[in-house]
Image (tube, rainbow, N blue to C red):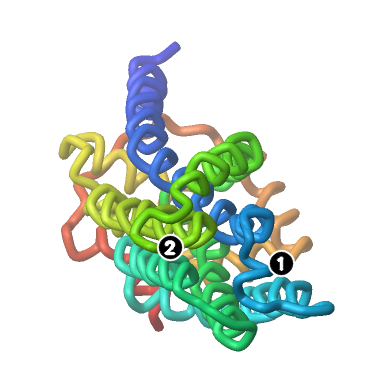
């Protein structure tokens, strides 16, 4: 093994370890909160929501359905905004807003109020998954994405594991502050989500070049290794490249004919380091 290859492997391990430790836990917590806040209405129903809100017939089912309608409608527009604001700002914003909406759910008194609050909740939560996937695609190489997406996606299973237990414990606050137990489920879980939004705002960097947890050497290496995988200058170009099988095949053939060269990270100018989101905004 050459010295250059050994250096590249060692630096790759360091970069991936730091990315995994600083990026995946906050995203996993946000995704967990996403599932808990959308499904806690079922636990609240058991605790008396349907009775106190005077829901009749299929009104509860309508409340569940409108959430997914707004959830689907917002996914693409949300990523459009994310490209312009940056993921380190937009993701915490939508998480904070849906935390507020979840908290306000504990104050509804009728079908109309619950219907409106669930529509707004869908608009807020719908942008999280596509936003996180797009965000990760600017930090990791393409072949590294599957495992990372799987890791934070698996955190949703935890919501089923202890979401019900948590709601049961909170519902025992029946009468505290003159509020029903099911109202406290929304209030406390919504407040926890708002706190998670603050954590995400602190820890999530906008780009590899602005990640404070890297040393200067690691930052330069991380940017260069990402560029070596994403030859295209923007996410749009990358998507076009992936959607063209013939082009990909030609590129694979040309790569096979190339003689492998040792990887040597070059100094990166600060202006060039910011290419990811600036280029996406065009």
Q: Is residue 166 left or right of residue 200?
A: right
Residue 150 percent coordinates (x, y): 62, 40
Q: Is residue 255 left or right of residue 230?
A: right
The residue mark sitting in front, 2 or 1, is 2
Closer to us: 46 or 174: 174
Residue 205 visible in the shown view: yes
Q: Which residue is mark 2?
A: 179
Check disc 2 and report its element: helix, strand or loop: loop
Identify the mark nearer the N-term, 2 or 1: 2
Q: Residue at x 33, y 26 (%)?
A: 14
Q: Residue at x 39, y 79 (%)?
A: 281
Q: Residue at x 77, y 61 (%)?
A: 245
102, above or below 281, in the image: above
The circle on residue 123 is: none
The circle on residue 243 is: 1
Check disc 1 and report its element: helix, strand or loop: loop
């Amino acid at each position: 093994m050459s010295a250059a290859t050994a250096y590249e492997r060692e630096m790759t391990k360091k970069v991936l370890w730091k990315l995994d430790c600083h990026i995946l836990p906050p995203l996993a917590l946000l995704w967990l909160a996403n599932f808990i806040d959308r499904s806690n209405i079922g636990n609240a129903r058991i605790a008396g929501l349907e009775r106190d809100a005077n829901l009749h017939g299929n009104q509860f089912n309508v409340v569940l359905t409108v959430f997914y309608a707004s959830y689907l409608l917002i996914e693409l527009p949300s990523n459009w905004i994310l490209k312009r604001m940056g993921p380190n700002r937009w993701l915490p914003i939508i998480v904070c807003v849906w935390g507020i909406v979840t908290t306000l759910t504990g104050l509804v008194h009728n079908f109309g109020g619950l219907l409106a609050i669930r529509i707004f909740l869908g608009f807020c939560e719908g942008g999280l998954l596509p936003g996180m996937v797009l965000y990760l695609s600017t930090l990791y190489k393409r072949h590294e994405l599957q495992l990372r997406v799987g890791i934070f996606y698996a955190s949703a299973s935890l919501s089923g594991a202890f979401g019900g237990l948590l709601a049961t414990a909170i519902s025992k606050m029946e009468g505290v502050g003159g509020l029903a137990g099911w109202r406290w489920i929304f209030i406390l879980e919504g407040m926890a989500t708002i706190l998670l939004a603050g954590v995400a705002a602190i820890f999530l960097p906008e780009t590899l070049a602005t990640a404070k947890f890297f040393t200067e050497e690691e930052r330069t290496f991380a940017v260069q290794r990402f560029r070596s995988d994403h030859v295209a200058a923007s996410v749009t170009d990358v998507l076009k490249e992936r959607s063209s099988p013939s082009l990909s095949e030609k590129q694979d053939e040309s790569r096979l004919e190339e003689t492998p060269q040792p990887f040597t990270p070059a100094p990166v100018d600060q202006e060039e380091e910011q290419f990811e989101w600036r280029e996406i905004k065009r």
